[in-house]
Amino acid sequence: MEIINFQEGNFRFLCFISFVLIFMACEFIFPLYKRTKKTFIRWGTNFLFVIIDVLILRLTFPLLAVGFASICVDKGFGLLNNVSLPFGLSLLISILLLDLGIWFQHFLFHRYRIFWRFHKIHHSDEELDFSTGIRFHPIEILISMIFKFIFILIIGPSAIMVIIFEIILNGSSIFNHSNIIIPRSFELLLRRIIVTPSMHRIHHSIEEEETNSNFGFNLSIWDRIFGTYLHKSKRSEEDLVLGLEEFYKMEKKGFIKLIIHPFINK
């Protein structure tokens, strides 16, 4: 099990670095917004978040989602562990249901203040690029892992299915936060299936109505089904104001300030 976890961890890290480099390069080639002086400071803050998040996860949980999926398979927990289906069909069902679970979790993070006070750190970024996709408060990451355990327990995907889904989710998060231009006709076609950067930028709008829309991270279908899909913002995409008003009022927005913000600002 330790060897599997080590290999899985290395493979996922390689995929993560690949996603970062690919979309960083794309942002240099065809960006939507011009970079500002704050961009590289933001990158430092956002990468520090992901480093701390990983360390806290490893210290807090004796096993993560993949290990928990293996236990559920051994114990026969979950829907897919009690039916006999071809691997391809089981994988498709796993990806669909896990993605629905992530959509539901994201909706709850906006709906309830106990979750929102931590999730809003993600929304505090006043620019949007690939690095925003890794900007999450450590407490939100811990809560998210508990949600994943619940979803895995109910659905019953195998370890390899969880690995595939986690890689897809990680890549889509970096992609849909990226600062890139996609030709409008192709973007509209693409968003019928997946969440595009243009669709997700609306979710990061400073307008509350727009922030509480487009909750999807990977598949766009869930927002259409549950009535939370917003096709376009009030402002043009180039003029969209991103972030949250309360953070514009903060003088200092460094890593430490953002970490303690949910505990001191209720």
Image: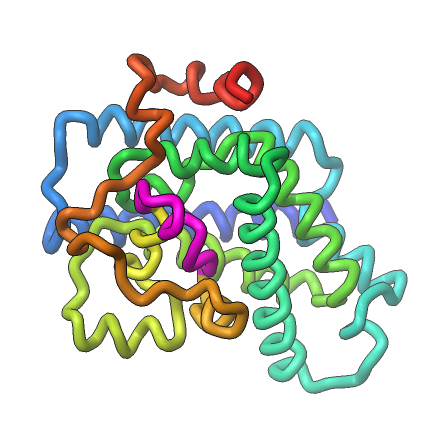
Magenta extent: 205-217
Q: Which residue is rendered at x = 57% and y = 46% of the image?
A: 111
Colouring style: rainbow
Return the x and y of residue 40 as percentages of the image width and height: 22, 28
Indicate yes or no whether the magenta region holds residue 14: no
Return the x and y of residue 34 as percentages of the image width and height: 10, 41
Image quarter where the C terminus lies is top right
Residue 149, relative to residue 185: is it above or below?
above
The answer to whether residue 26 is left or right of residue 103 is left
Nearer-the-camera pick, 62 or 153: 153
The answer to whether residue 226 is left or right of residue 206 is right
Residue 53, relative to residue 128: is it above or below?
above
Q: Main secondary structure of the magenta part?
A: loop
The answer to whether one can see residue 240 in this image is: yes
Quarter location, residue 175: bottom left
Residue 181, relative to residue 258: is it above or below?
below
Nearer-the-camera pick, 44 or 216: 216
Q: Which residue is rendered at x = 65% and y = 39% of the image?
A: 143
Q: Which residue is rendered at x = 18% and y = 76% of the image?
A: 185
Return the x and y of residue 126 as percentages of the image width and height: 27, 34
Nearer-the-camera pick, 53 or 248: 248
The answer to whether one can see residue 26 in this image is: no
The answer to whether residue 241 is left or right of residue 88 is left
Indicate yes or no whether the magenta region holds residue 212: yes
Return the x and y of residue 112 as percentages of the image width and height: 61, 41
Quarter location, residue 60: top right
